Image (cartoon, rainbow, N blue to C red):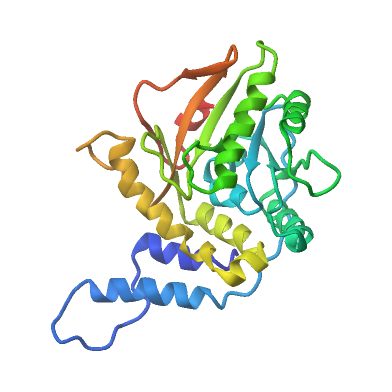
């Protein structure tokens, strides 16, 4: 079993694994908050995961343009569900291997380990580890002809995330007019003002993403952000309940979710394809209807 599963499942179920010291007054939420703190502290000692899943071969391909290695996993809930529920092949394109040249080879190995764990393919676009340019992306899009393209949104704060957005857009603009695909924009460093898609994750899915991120070993050694992914996804439910579902609307009973913006690319430009925001529960037919 994935060694992070119990950690994520406890967050989902609200299990209080530890008892706090006596309080001056009986605050019924203290045990809850302490259990979250203790769970994260305990998960820091989880040993390295291992495992390889065969790549799903399919004519229906999803290309995930990752500004850096690890971004593919952080925003990877939708691609993971598209692979497992709709049988689509996931292809990760690392646009860069980071600005630290001394770490690039290590980050390439970590990316390979993370993608092997999830069953995703990697396309470098260049023989070396240099940053990709628009011609490289056009060549990849022309070769693969993906049904779905995943990229950061234009306001994702981090300079490489923002430049990746415009690089992919420029490449799409250079494709022939007959080329079309579904475009999914992601967020991490900077939240979107107008996401229109909230995708639920269960404990198994989220734990697998946490485990995959943990394989970016040196990155999480300096900052164990993989352990905070479930909390980020919990907050996405709070935000998405109104940003996607509508102000004042009922919030879906999700424990974890990731927010996206879904549009089509047709005739050289974006086309809106959702009249209203959409939430996709785990296992719902809605995922296959959208994609």
**Front in this rendered view, residue 284 or 109:** 109
**Front in this rendered view, residue 223 or 242:** 223
Left or right of 46 on screen, residue 233? left
For residue 185, above or below residue 47 = above
For residue 233, above or below residue 27 = above
Q: Residue 29 location, x and y as percent?
A: 22, 71
Look at the image and tell me in which quarter the N terminus lies.
bottom right
Left or right of 118 on screen, residue 102? right
Q: How many marks?
A: 0
At x 41%, y 44%, the residue is 191
Left or right of 11 on screen, residue 65? right
Q: Residue 130 location, x and y as percent?
A: 78, 47
The quadrant in which residue 88 appears is top right
At x 62%, y 54%, the residue is 70
- Residue at the extreme left: 25
At x 38%, y 48%, the residue is 236
For residue 163, above or below residue 269 = below
Q: Is residue 249 visible?
A: yes
Look at the image and tell me in which quarter the C terminus lies.
top right
The quadrant in which residue 16 appears is bottom left
Q: Is residue 85 visible?
A: no
At x 56%, y 46%, the residue is 159
Q: Residue 87 location, x and y as percent?
A: 64, 35
For residue 243, above or below residue 119 = above
**Front in this rendered view, residue 186 or 289:** 186
Q: Residue 280 location, x and y as percent?
A: 42, 36
Left or right of 181 on screen, residue 144? right
């Amino acid at each position: 079993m994935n060694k992070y599963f119990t950690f994520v499942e406890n967050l989902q179920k609200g299990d209080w694994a530890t008892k706090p010291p006596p309080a001056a007054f009986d605050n019924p939420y203290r045990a809850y908050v302490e259990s979250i703190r203790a769970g994260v502290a305990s998960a820091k000692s989880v040993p390295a995961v291992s495992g390889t899943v065969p790549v799903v071969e399919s004519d229906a391909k999803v290309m995930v343009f990752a500004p850096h290695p690890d971004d593919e996993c952080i925003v990877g809930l939708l691609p993971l569900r598209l692979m497992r529920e709709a049988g689509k092949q996931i292809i990760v394109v690392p646009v860069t291997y980071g600005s630290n040249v001394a770490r690039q080879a290590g980050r390439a190995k970590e990316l390979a380990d993370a993608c092997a764990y999830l069953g995703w393919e990697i396309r470098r676009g260049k023989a070396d580890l240099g940053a990709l340019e628009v011609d490289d992306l056009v060549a990849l899009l022309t070769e693969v002809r993906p049904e779905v393209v995943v990229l950061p949104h234009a306001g994702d704060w981090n300079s490489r995330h923002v430049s990746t957005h415009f690089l992919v857009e420029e490449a799409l603009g250079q494709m022939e007019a007959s080329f079309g695909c579904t475009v999914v924009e992601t967020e991490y460093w900077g939240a979107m003002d107008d996401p229109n898609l909230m995708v639920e994750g269960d404990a198994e899915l989220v734990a697998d993403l946490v485990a995959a991120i943990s394989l970016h070993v040196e990155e999480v050694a300096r900052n164990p952000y993989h352990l905070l992914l479930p909390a980020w996804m919990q907050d996405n439910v709070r935000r998405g309940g109104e940003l996607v579902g509508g102000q004042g609307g009922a919030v879906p009973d999700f424990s974890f979710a990731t927010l996206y913006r879904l549009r089509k690319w047709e005739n050289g430009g974006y086309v809106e394809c959702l009249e209203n925001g959409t939430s996709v529960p785990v296992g719902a037919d809605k995922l296959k209807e959208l994609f």
